[in-house]
């Protein structure tokens, strides 16, 4: 078969949604993952062999040739596929690099005497990192990350390594999986990896990190609660970080619930000031209000203060609330939280409690004693979709606009109805794509969305399916307890692992590695 032969779409049900096939037949890219939110990618043009070819020297050679000789001759659809193929090759090459880095870390030359490793944390990974850093012109920490990744991909994260080798995920996502599962018991690592990997291809690194957090909470709520208690002990406010032009940044590391509540309170106060005519931007107002409240203990604007109310939503299942079940809750805008925290939040405080049916996830009660129930359609649609319905956008539904999928045209037969099956939350940016940039959105059934891009790529977006929970008698729990007994974890000292999201602390003379998606922007 030649690179430019057409290939048939996989027989995975996607053709049912492929729409009207054009004169060149149906074109499908990738495979249905069966679990993901984005499952079908097919359009009106044929799939060529190189669109779906596995990465390797042959594909790299073809892309190089295309780039030199005929990139401008490719049609728009093929240019998108060219970028995708090049990224697959990059992922494949990264897999080679980390495999080598992991191998290096096993060599005798990378081993310090045992006492040096214990006293100074001179692990083989760290020494290999220093070795590679010099050769590659990167920090020792970045070199160490290559070695650490390579070693992990040899062991429990081998399926992640396979996905990287096949170009289904990129280096950043592999790192996201590694960091998200750092320090976890092996059976839980394997289970979470199994849960998130099948749909990682179409998830952004940020979404993947959220999937991992959600899977951990769903698979092992008790472990998640324990880890949260441990992590909360590490809360801190880092000293000011010097920034150019006389500026500085502050980084508060605290519980997700406190961080969301604080942000909501400040955000609402800022919006209230804007509505009252303050000329400052929302960004400026949020920054100024934090300073005012901390430095002066209160806002200088009494009317703004009176209107502030934290509006943080916590979804908690009825059985969890009653204490008869252990389903995780969800902090809207953040993701899953362990049942202990969810129960505690729902029991009181300033949170908006949304009680859900443990089997369907449908909202049963909205804390009627505190707030009016969301009887209207918009609230129903926001609960249904929870985020903007663009597949890679995570803007919370409550910060999004409610869009008529088929535009509402009063008095005209072709207008869309104001019904759940024709409404969806869209963030401002995604709304603009749909209205002005030839991104077409359809909603074949309520809550299922088909996007067609200007180049003819199609993406189906389904509501996020929850990860399966584990029964109380699942063997994973026993494995975990056994492992914990066998391998007591270092609780302090140089061996402490950096929790995901905590900014890396650079050694002397080193600059920090680039922040991951969860790190502050400095
Ligand atoms: Zn969006």
Image (cartoon, grey):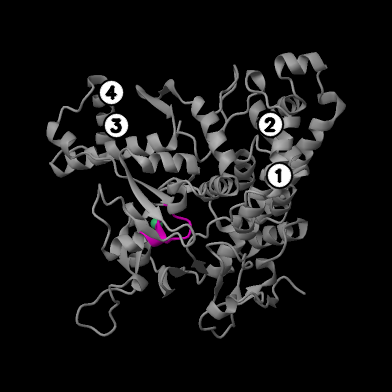
Whether residue 368 appears in this view of the structure is yes
N-terminal of the pair, mark 1 or mark 3, is 1
Q: CA distance from mark 2 to mark 4?
A: 40 Å
How dense is the environment of label 2, judged by Cα within 10 Å: few (below 14), some, or many (20 and up)?
many
Disc 4 marks which residue? Answer: 294
Find numbered disc 4 in the image and state the secondary structure of the residue it sits on.
Answer: helix
Judge whether 281 appears above or below 382 on screen.
above
- From the image, tell me which residue sits under label 3: 287
Residue 225 or 282: which is nearer the viewer?
225
Residue 384 is one of the magenta-drawn residues: yes
How far is mark 4 from mark 3, CA to CA? 11 Å
**Mark 1 and mark 3: span between their CA atoms?**
43 Å
- For label 3, the SS is helix
Question: Residue 229, percent across and down?
Answer: 52, 31
Of marks 1 and 3, the one in the foreground: 1
Please report the bounds of the magenta region as a residue range: 383-394
Labelled pair 2, 1 in contact (Cβ < 8 Å): no
The residue that label 2 is drawn on is 143
Q: Identify the mark nearer the N-term, 4 or 3.
A: 3
State how far apart marks 2 and 1 are (Cα). 27 Å
Q: Secondary structure at mark 2?
A: helix
């Amino acid at each position: 078969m030649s690179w430019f032969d057409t290939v048939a779409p996989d027989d995975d049900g996607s053709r049912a949604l492929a729409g009207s096939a054009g004169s060149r037949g149906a074109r499908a890219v990738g495979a249905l993952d069966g679990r993901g939110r984005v499952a079908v990618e097919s359009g009106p043009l044929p799939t060529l062999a190189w669109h779906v070819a596995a990465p390797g020297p042959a594909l790299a050679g073809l892309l190089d040739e295309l780039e030199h000789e005929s990139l401008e001759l490719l049609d728009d659809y093929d240019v998108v596929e060219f970028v995708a193929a090049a990224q697959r090759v990059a992922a494949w090459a990264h897999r080679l690099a980390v495999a080598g880095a992991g191998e290096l870390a096993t060599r005798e030359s990378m081993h310090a005497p045992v006492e040096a490793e214990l006293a100074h944390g001179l692990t083989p990974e760290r020494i290999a990192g220093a070795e590679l850093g010099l050769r590659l012109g990167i920090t020792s920490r970045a070199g160490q990350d290559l070695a650490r990744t390579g070693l992990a991909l040899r062991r429990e994260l081998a399926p992640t390594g396979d996905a990287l080798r096949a170009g289904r995920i990129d280096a950043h996502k592999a790192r996201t999986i590694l960091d998200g599962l750092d320090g976890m018991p092996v059976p839980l690592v394997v289970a979470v990896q199994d849960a998130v990997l099948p749909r990682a291809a179409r998830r952004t690194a940020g979404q993947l990190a959220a999937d991992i957090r959600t899977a951990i909470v769903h698979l092992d709520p008790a472990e998640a609660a324990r880890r949260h208690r441990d992590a909360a002990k590490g809360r801190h406010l880092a000293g000011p970080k010097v920034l150019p032009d006389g500026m500085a940044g502050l980084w508060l590391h605290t519980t997700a619930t406190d961080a969301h509540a604080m942000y909501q309170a400040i955000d609402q106060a800022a919006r209230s000031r804007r509505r009252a005519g303050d000329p400052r931007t929302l960004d400026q107002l949020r920054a100024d209000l934090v300073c005012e409240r901390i430095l002066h203990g209160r806002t200088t604007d009494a009317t703004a203060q009176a209107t502030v109310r934290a509006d943080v939503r916590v979804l908690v299942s009825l059985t969890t609330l009653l204490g008869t079940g252990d389903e995780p809750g969800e902090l809207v805008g953040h993701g899953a939280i362990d049942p202990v925290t969810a129960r505690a939040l729902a029991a009181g405080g300033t949170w908006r409690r949304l009680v859900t049916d443990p089997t369907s996830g449908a909202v049963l009660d909205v804390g009627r004693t505190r707030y009016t129930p969301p009887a209207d359609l918009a609230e129903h649609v926001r609960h249904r979709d929870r985020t903007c319905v663009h597949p890679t956008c995570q803007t919370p539904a409550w910060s999004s606009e409610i869009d008529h999928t088929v535009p509402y045209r009063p008095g005209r037969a072709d207008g869309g109805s104001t019904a759940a099956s024709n409404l969806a939350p869209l963030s401002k940016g995604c709304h603009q794509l749909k209205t002005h940039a030839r991104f077409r959105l359809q909603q074949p059934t309520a809550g299922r969305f088909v996007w067609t891009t200007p180049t003819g790529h199609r993406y189906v977006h389904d509501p996020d399916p929850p990860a399966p929970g584990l029964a109380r008698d699942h063997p994973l729990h026993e494995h975990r307890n056994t492992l914990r007994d066998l391998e007591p974890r270092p609780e302090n000292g140089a061996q402490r692992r950096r929790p995901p999201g905590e900014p890396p602390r650079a050694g002397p003379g080193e600059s920090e590695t680039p922040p991951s998606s969860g790190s502050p922007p400095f």
